[in-house]
Image: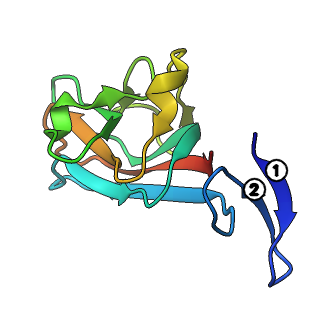
Amino acid sequence: MPQIKQNADGSLGIEGAIAGPGEFITASEYWTATSVDSTFLTTSRPMVVNTITARIDVVGSDAGAVTAVIRKVASGTALASGTALHSGTINLKGTANTNQVMTLSTTPADLRLAAGDSLVIDFTGVLTAAVGCVTVMLSPV
């Protein structure tokens, strides 16, 4: 079980099973109308996802659905073949300037990343004018 620890620089951390400073990690990915599916974090140690929050700055204007899914993928796995970390999708045509707090997967193994796993954003639809950001909070295990 992780333990709270004080780092040498005076900061607070969570010490996982593997040595390290025990930092919390926030990984953010920004999108614009020209964004494509992409990796935005590759872990160096085992981690667990705590929260996923998206914010729409400019609403997508395409006639069809415009969404995104945050997935974990192992090395050698195609982005779209990764495991979804949340139920539903991020609505890129949602209300501007409003947070979308995603409901995390209820399967604990889905939320655990091994060292070397990556977080990716997988878009559907045409982003057109869509602009925003998603932030994933992780902690060591």
Give coordinates of residue 72: x percent, y percent.
35, 38
What residue is at 62 percent from the left and 45 percent from the top? 141
Left or right: 22 as drawn, with respect to 93: right
Q: Seen in the image, is 62 located left or right of residue 5?
A: left
Residue shown at 85% from the left, 55% from the top: 4
**Quadrant location, the N terminus:** top right
Q: Residue 72: in sight, yes or no?
A: yes
Q: Determine which residue is flagged by label 2.
A: 14
Whether label 1 touches label 2, CB < 8 Å: yes
Tell me if residue 125 comes above or below residue 9 in the rendering: above
Residue 43 position by quadrant: bottom left
Amino acid at circle 2: Ile
Q: In this rendered view, identify the residue nearer to me: 37 or 35.
A: 37
Q: Is residue 51 above or below residue 23?
A: above
In terms of depth relative to the viewer, which is nearer, 82 or 66? 82
Q: Is residue 73 left or right of residue 110?
A: left
Above or below for 39 versus 66: below
Q: Residue at x 58, y 48 (%)?
A: 138
Task: Please state the horizontal and vertical placement of residue 95, each as a whole percent of the image.
Answer: 47, 34
Secondary structure type for disc 1: strand
